[in-house]
């Protein structure tokens, strides 16, 4: 049996992912290796607790200064909050990767 590729999310986003409210994540280059069609095993960052699998729909490069309300809507947060969150998680990083995903189970 093949192992699924792992990805983690902060546990505060678990409910949004499971409800389908959050359908993208923005990551830095170190997490840009995911392939379209690949199934990812999703765990919480804090506890490494599995909570769902997701399928990668697209991986698209996006500059921090090109983030829009459309990205924020798909993250289920305001653009202002999204930008401050990214600056907190990835200080000084301009090149981001939008990973669009579909909840599987
Ligand atoms: C280890 C690590 O970096 N984990 C991350 C990074 C990002 N996210 C979320 C936060 C925002 O919703 C988007 C944009 O960065 O992705 C995360 O849950 N865990």
Image: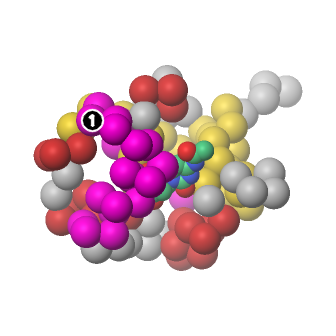
Q: Is residue 41 magenta?
A: no
Tell me: 80 left or right of 100: left
Q: How many marks?
A: 1
Element type where label 1 sits in the image: loop
Quadrant placement of the N terminus: top right
Tell me: 80 left or right of 50: left
Q: Position of residue 32 (x, y in %)?
A: 45, 28
* Mark 1 nearby-residue class (10 Å; few <14, some 14–19, many ≥20): some
User: What residue do we see at 48% from left, 70% from top?
Assistant: 20
Tell me: 20 left or right of 74: right
Magenta stretch bounds? 79-105
Q: Is residue 51 above or below residue 98?
A: below
Q: Position of residue 30 (x, y in %)?
A: 51, 26
The quadrant holding residue 90 is top left
Q: Is residue 18 visible?
A: no
User: What residue do we see at 63% from left, 42% from top?
Assistant: 7
Who is closer to the viewer here, 42 or 92?
A: 92
The quadrant holding residue 88 is bottom left
| Residue that extends furthest to the front in the rendered view of this protein | 92
Tell me: 53 left or right of 99: right
In this figure, which residue is indicated by the disc labeled 1?
Answer: 94
Q: Is residue 77 above or below residue 8?
A: below
Q: Is residue 71 visible?
A: yes
């Amino acid at each position: 049996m093949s192992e699924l590729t792992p990805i983690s999310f902060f546990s505060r986003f678990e409910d949004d992912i499971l409800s389908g409210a959050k359908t993208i994540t923005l990551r830095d280059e170190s997490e840009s290796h995911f392939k379209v069609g690949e199934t990812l095993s999703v765990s919480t960052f804090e506890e490494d607790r599995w909570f769902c699998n997701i399928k990668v729909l697209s991986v698209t490069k996006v500059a921090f200064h090109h983030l829009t309300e459309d990205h924020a809507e798909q993250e289920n947060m305001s653009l202002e909050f999204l930008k401050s969150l990214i600056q907190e998680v990835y200080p000084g990083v301009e090149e981001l990767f939008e990973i669009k995903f579909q909840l599987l189970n």
